Image (cartoon, rainbow, N blue to C red):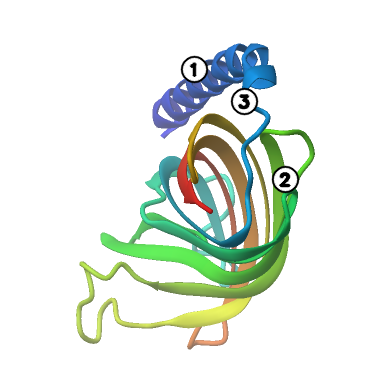
Amino acid sequence: MKTIKKQIMLRMAITALTLITTISYAQKNSASHNNFTRDGFMFEFGLGGGVISIEDSGGLRNFDDSQGGGTFPELKFGYMLNNSLAITISLPGMIYTLDENDRDFGGIIPSVQYWIKDRWWVHGGAGLAIDSPALYDIKENVNDDWNTGIAAMVSTGYEVYRKNKFALNVQSKLLVGGVKLNNDIDREVVQFSLGIGFSWF
């Protein structure tokens, strides 16, 4: 288990270094692309990967047992109030494995997105947490329980490519939440992910 954790941490460090390098390069070229306008409705889907930690109050799992997971698909719908501020509904999520079954921890998060700089944005909100079977791995009476609770999310990203009404960004996201299971056990989850987003304005 420790070897897997070290591999995950090494991969995340390499990915973070790559993202920092990309952002640094993009910042040098941002002055020539500051005429990009955002207005009206926006839509984004993203994909990536990260680490998820789960703890159940029943004592069967704790936060020391982290595992890697994929974040596909992640969706965001919103409306631009002006060129720098949007109100959004985000649907983050990450696939994880529990008792040899694939599940998804995500949510429906009302949120706000604000561009601090021309290309750099921050995003956050709180809303409904959803712990559910992965849609491709639903098994009757085994992996068919849906649990709800509360989740909070913060993320940041940088637009590395823009053309017309399209933007490609690199982003990181932290989602923290908890749900109540059918057997009156509380499940708490922390997940951190890195990925790319494809946005239209």
Residue 99 appears in the figure: no
Residue 117 lies left or right of residue 75; in this view the side is right
Is 145 above or below relative to 78? Answer: below
What residue is at 65 percent from the left and 33 percent from the top? 35
What residue is at 44 percent from the left and 23 percent from the top? 11
Could you say which quadrant of the image residue 59 lies in? bottom right
Q: Dot 2 surroundings within 10 Å: few (below 14), some, or many (20 or more)?
A: some
Is 91 above or below relative to 123? Answer: below
Q: Nearer the viewer, mark 1 or mark 2?
A: 2
Which circle marks residue 122 in the picture? 2
Q: Which residue is mark 3?
A: 33
Q: Which residue is mark 1?
A: 14
Q: Residue 153 location in percent, x, y?
A: 67, 57
Of 50 and 185, nearer the camera is: 50
Residue 151 lies left or right of residue 19; in this view the side is right
What residue is at 25 percent from the left and 79 percent from the top? 142
Of 47 and 200, nearer the camera is: 200
Which of marks 3 and 1 precedes in the sequence? 1
Q: Dot 3 surroundings within 10 Å: few (below 14), some, or many (20 or more)?
A: few
Which of marks 2 and 3 precedes in the sequence? 3
What residue is at 70 percent from the left and 41 percent from the top? 121
Residue 121 appears in the figure: yes
